[in-house]
Image (tube, grey):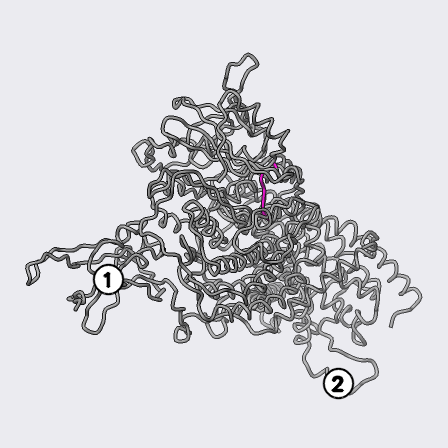
Amino acid sequence: MLTSLMPEGLAVFIECVVIGVCIILMYAILAIILIYMERKVCAFFQCRLGPNRVGKWGSMQVFADVIKMLIKEIISLKHSDRFLYELAPYMVIIASILAFSCIPINKGMGVLDFNVGVFFLLAASSIGVVGILLAGWGSNNKFSLIGAMRSGAQIISYELSVGLSILTMVVLMGTMQFSEIVEGQADGWFIFKGHIPALIAFVIYLIAGNAETNRGPFDLPEAESELTAGYHTEYSGMHFGFFYLAEYLNMFIVASVAATIFLGGWMPFHVVGLDSFNTVMDYIPGFIWFFGKAFFVVFLLMWIKWTFPRLRIDQILKLEWKYLVPISMVNLVIMVLIVVFGLHF
Amino acid sequence: MNEIIEIPLERFRDEVLKLRTEKQMDFLESLTGMDWGESLGVIYHLESTVTGEKMVIKTSTNNRENPELPTVSDIWKAAELNEREVYDFYGIRFINHPDMRRLYLRNDWVGYPMRKDDDPMDERNPLRMNNEETIDSTTELKLNSDGTLEDQENIIFDDREYVINIGPQHPATHGVLRFRVSLEGETIKKLDANCGYIHRGIEKMCESLTYPQTLALTDRLDYLGAHQNRHALCMCIEKAMGVEVSERVQYIRTIMDELQRIDSHLLFYSCLCMDLGALTAFFYGFRDREKILDIFEETCGGRLTMNYNTIGGVQWDLHPNFIRRVKEFIPYMRGIIHEYHEVFTGNIIAHQRLKGVGVLSREDAISFGATGGTGRASGWACDVRKRIPYGVYDKVDFKEIIYTEGDCFARYMVRMDEIMESLCIIEQLIDNIPEGSYQEKMKPIIRVPEGSYYAAVEGSRGEFGVFIESHGEKNPYRVHFRSTGLPLVSVVDTISRGSKIADLIAIGGTLDYVVPDIDR
Amino acid sequence: MKNENSYLGGLLNGIGTLLTGMKTTITVFFRAKTTEQYPENRAELKMFDRFRGELIMPHNENNEHRCVSCGICQNVCPNDTIEIISETIETEEGKKKKILKTYKYDLGSCIFCELCVNACPHDAITFDQTFEHAVFNRDKLIHTLNHEGSKVIEKK
């Protein structure tokens, strides 16, 4: 549409800028919704009410927190490594936004849709590790360094499990492109199609995804009661805000990838054979399905976080290398056998 | 009261070694420094865990310029921190003690405050505005083989070690306590505890207060055992004056002690879970604790500073609603405790964090004097309620919970089971409270006859003892509180070597010390 | 249990315990919450009678109190919280009597030990149940307990 008004290069440029702004806006709005949801959900688990003073049912609480964080003083350290210290939050945010753009929200609404979509997603989310290590080193603080080292070891280990479980589903589908993965679930979500190995892969993916984002029982690197905030101790104001945002959005990304690959993305819930049921389901628009599934998985992750105590770092690594990786590999072999012999639905 | 046996200085070491080996006096209950005017000395309360015999011995020196006494820290490890405390307050140096540093006061404090001729408020110690220098070396007074004494320097942490501070302000140290930890990767090599951040000089203050006024300070020692602390002090004064309290008062005191014990153990559970990361369990514990605090508030008037026991009885009679509320509480607690076990105890993550971590052997527990849940988890039957029954504990039927593994999980389970036992005790007593007076008639000015007296109760965290020496006046001459937490802090170094930082948090949480009790 | 030593048994046992914990928290999720909405529920919030909120000197309807300024409470207080300022006057019969001018009570240094209330021979002072003591200035914490123009109840 715009090409009729101006040369092509400029139109593409404007389109990119507009899409970029849209992504950042959606990012921010989702973060606000997620933070509010976390505070309310965790309060309800703890038999208390959560924020309910600022605005009706505490809805303006997060806006107040955002404003507070924006106007806080950014304290600069005397002896930190300036370049690395400043760079770290930005790396984390960039990794997060890149991963966020790959996800298809509705038919044709994925921003970055390559034919190696899944692979790109895994690669982009790995940039975040660099950000964390830079934060710990650049802070010139013994506690931050310990936290960053632990976090680095944890994230690098769990990427294996994430990769293996996603690979299991790619074997089932045969493609790595996100839009085709979702299209292929029109006659049933993968978790039903692939039965046993898909279920095991789903559970492993959730556990490993939890550990990837330093959440839940795996949050030792930033454990508040042990190392007082770990690798982001020395950050204040908006720099801390970036880390905080990135953590919530990473959780959302993990949840939405789970929703896309295992639960069907924006595909409604179809049962093969019940056509009238299917047409009723089709009336509900795609993005409501998508967000519903993603928020359901987010709720699951929050439930896990607020119930269990923390694992120690050597127990986290033991869980990964002794339990999750072998089980994922065996699972992959089973899935391959099922696909070869056509035993799936 | 036992006779105090005086042992002269020259024969002291040999006599004490004989007591340890021949008479098996392996539990040093309390070590109290004293200033008798011309001489300075130390009083030791000893007990044998094998025969149950108790002894009180003392030794003193007339040299007020450079008082030196032989150490007993190689015989009973509990003496390590206690002798540092005596050095801090009285200036007595102990020969062959490996670490002769001040415990509670700053390194640059001038003078020895508990001596009778020393006034801590004069101008030698102004309010210093700069931080205390951390000194990593300490002196030891060594006895050479030819009989001469010399100072030797011992290094605590040298320059090449990676030392981090945990505390004093830290969410997991249960108060203001500073641990300096030398690490190797994630493993702890050595640990040094710095106490004294909340030292208020209660023992020195008590020397200038009358007996009823000293009662008000006990609520602020171990604030989760307010009833038990005051019970100990009232028992000691009543024993000294020969006052018999009525049956009703005994029943009331016992029931209040047990309710306080449940309250303290619920807080232990909440804080342990919070330290390990399970924040929901924290709120469950506090929600149920509120019910107990409401019961206390109705009868005693306070939720933390209870102010209930007095010399000769209790402040007021039980509120008419008390019995009904306690009877409602007991089935509620029984019904809800399964939630605690489901959320935390059965959890495999909790098992991994707590089992096999921080093992304390029975000999170490006795030598350090670590009583309470910690000692019972290591297999030592140290409950004062069974050893020296007081109140109406000899009339109730309850089990003493003992586990033998000595690790964090055993310490945790001891306290959870003790909650159930306390509920049993209250159930047996609540219907049978006899009628009677709730306060004996006392003189307006209370004077305690001359002599030394010791009384102990089973606090929530261990044996809480009160030692009073009186010269017949209306102020005590010396009051010493045998704190429940000081042995627990001295144990941390021994049991955390070789474990990780995350384990240190679990160990600190399960030892369950409260810092105002340590620092007094 | 013997199946804890095997790989699969240990794994399934672990997952079982985790699921039990999750079941408990989800039941609490749907239960009624225990939060009290504080400033709005002041009407229902009644403290117990014995709650020690603040020291007061009760006055009857003729603005009379019972303090004869004997000074026992001031001596008994461990913390020098109470200060009694009294003056000696001559009564009609020519006897010298001490009456109370100002009864100063420092809320900031009171430790609520009730020794003063116990020691008072005439029940002149007692604790009431107000608990909202926060002020911005420490001087406002020093209260004068006897009202303006009040005098002691005459003994008939």
SS assignment at label 1 = loop
Position of residue C9 relative to residue B498, above or below, is below
Give the label on residue C145, or none: 1
Find residue A163 and report its horizontal and vertical position in percent: 76, 56
The quadrant where residue C46 appears: bottom left
Q: Looking at the picture, tell me which residue is in the foreground, B274 or B37.
A: B37
Helix, strand or loop: magenta stretch: loop
Query: Is residue B370 on the magenta stretch?
Result: yes
Question: Magenta residues, as a range?
Answer: B367-372
Question: Callout 2: residue from which chain?
Answer: A
Find residue C16 and report its horizontal and vertical position in percent: 75, 62
**Amino acid type, label 1:** Leu
Q: Looking at the picture, tell me which residue is in the foreground, A272 or B431.
A: B431
SS assignment at label 2 = helix
For the C terminus of chain B, which image quadrant? top left
Would residue C22 be seen by someone viewing this image from the given angle? yes
Q: Looking at the picture, tell me which residue is in the foreground, A115 or B318.
A: B318
Find residue A266 and report its horizontal and vertical position in percent: 71, 73
Position of residue A60 relative to residue B169, above or below, is below
Residues under numbered marks 2 and 1 in contact, where contact means CB atoms less than 8 Å apart: no
Cα separation, mark 2 vs mark 1, equals 79 Å
Give the label on residue A279, or none: 2
